[in-house]
Amino acid sequence: MNVDFITAIKMYFANYANFRGRSTRAEYWWAMLFVFLVGCVASFLGDIFTSIVGLALIVPNLAILTRRFHDAGKSGWWVVGFYIAQFAVMGFSMSSLFGAIAGGNIASVQDIVANHSGSIVLGSIIMFAIGIWMIVICCTPSKPDNQYGPNPYGEQ
């Protein structure tokens, strides 16, 4: 089943917290375009509004991403794993920097960046690779019927 922009947005909100089943590529990418456009509008309205919109869309974003992974034949737990890995890499590569910033020692921040640039760059590369891997999975065509439900296109 191919969906247009309006149908995808309706499905996005109708399945606000639905982590079961499958979502097609079209449904996912139209919804992400909507989220991007809403984010752009929210950014013009101020930081507080942007934060409220961002918090309101966390659950449906995770739900549709999980359903998209299901459609590609992957467990939704991969989404959790990807985010844990990203936060762990970011925390590991930036922990020294955060400590210096919290202490207010700006000269120390420059030294830390210079001395730990390798781990910061490595962490950034790993985060980038995880992001690319997630995009590849989201671009994967629908699999035939699988343990997460029938093929949304009705094909075998």
Image: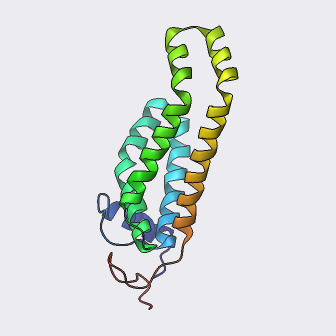
Which corner quadrant of the image does residue 101 belong to? top right
Image location of residue 119, percent across then percent down: 62, 33
Look at the image and tell me in which quarter the N terminus lies.
bottom left
Quadrant occupied by the C terminus: bottom left
Please name the residue shown 63% across and 39% down the image. 122
At x 52%, y 65%, the residue is 138
Q: Position of residue 30 (x, y in %)?
A: 51, 65
Above or below 111: residue 86: below
Give the vertical position of 107 relative to 130 (above or below).
above
Outermost residue on the right side: it is 114
Q: Is residue 5 left or right of residue 119?
A: left
Colour pattern of the rendering: rainbow
Is residue 122 toward the left or the right of residue 11 in the image?
right
Identified at 50% across, 49% down, the residue is 38
State the residue in front, 116 or 36.
116
Identify the residue shown where x is 49% and y is 44%: 86
Place of residue 113 in the rendered image (x, y in percent of width and height, measured from the top left): 66, 22
Position above or below: 22 against 96: below
The image quadrant that residue 79 belongs to is bottom left
For the image, the number of numbered tags is 0
Which residue is the extreme one toward the bottom? 156
> In which quarter of the view is residue 97 placed?
top right
